Image (cartoon, rainbow, N blue to C red):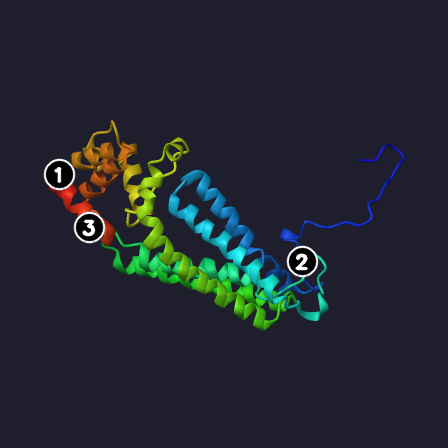
Amino acid sequence: MAADGECSLPASWRPVSLTHVEYPAGDLSGQLLAYLSLSPVFVIVGFVTLIIFKRELHTISFLGGLALNEGVNWLIKNIIRDPRPCGGAHLTVTTKYGMPSSHAQFMWFFSVYSFLFLYLRMHQTNNARFLDLLWRHVLSLCLVTVALLVSYSRVYLLYHTWSQVLYGGIAGSVMAVAWFAFTQEILTPLFPRIAAWPISEFFLIRDTSLIPNVLWFEYTVTRAEASEGIPHSQTGITKADRRGNRLCRVGWRLALEECLVHRGLNYNNKLNRNRQRKLGTKLQ
């Protein structure tokens, strides 16, 4: 800080280049691609927002996979040390190495993991089979399109070569498949224990891995909760639904599973078949 009438300039300045993207002046396509190349920042902001308001373990695990993916990218870059194209046309990048592209690796990790989650993790919970598949196909197409456009933007704006983007996409896809398998086979069985930790209960961290479709589940529970005190003849919600709603208020995992069984939801999860049989016998 300089006093009045004084100006002490530092020897050099460095910009915060996390969201600094350059494009050719007057190039409308370049400007649009520059905004698209900021997609990883938007994704991170979305994850942080979800974690703050939902506090769900699988979302936290997904973000952890993205962080690990970025760490692997940094490690590969500093091992290969392949320079960026055009002798480093952009002076505001965080690293002078370009192999593999971190933007491409990030977006393909996010897209491939989301694709696997949509088709292998989520299951339909109602009879709208056609609409259920349609929105998954549309969302998957949008994810792949954004990943392709972000990858192309890095080449168009001279931040990377085609090979750097290609290998970034391959690395991100491989990391996504590996992290999805690790999450499903190793982490998911541990989520109930983690959710039961005192610190998890203090921060209201929850595990929804047993719920096939969280969106549908939250919709039905919210609807039942909002109807409390209103005659069921006016809402269309039966007494049985109200009983399920009361079970859902209890924070313990057993009560949640009883609630899911009561509502007739199909877990379709091999890791919990034995637990379902026990719960079914108990409810009878």
Q: Is residue 135 visible?
A: no
Of the numbered discs 1 and 3, the one sitting upstream in the chain is 3
Q: Residue 260 lies in what quarter of the image?
A: top left
Outermost residue, bottom side: 163
Q: Residue at x 21, y 30 (%)?
A: 231
Q: Is residue 265 left or right of residue 94?
A: left
Q: Residue at x 40, y 33 (%)?
A: 199
Q: Which residue is mark 2?
A: 93
Q: Secondary structure at mark 3?
A: helix
**In front here: 235 or 23?**
23
Q: Is residue 29 visible?
A: yes
Check disc 1 and give the amino acid type: Lys
Q: Which residue is mark 1?
A: 282
Image quarter where the C terminus lies is: top left
Q: Position of residue 276 (x, y in %)?
A: 18, 46
Image quarter where the N terminus lies is: top right
Q: Secondary structure at mark 1?
A: helix
Q: Secondary structure at mark 2?
A: loop
**In front here: 226 or 71?**
71
Check disc 3 and give the amino acid type: Arg
Q: Position of residue 119 (x, y in %)?
A: 33, 60
Q: Is residue 139 left or right of residue 94?
A: left
Q: Separation of disc 2 and disc 3 at Cα?
A: 51 Å
Q: Which residue is mark 3?
A: 273
Of the numbered discs 2 and 3, the one sitting upstream in the chain is 2
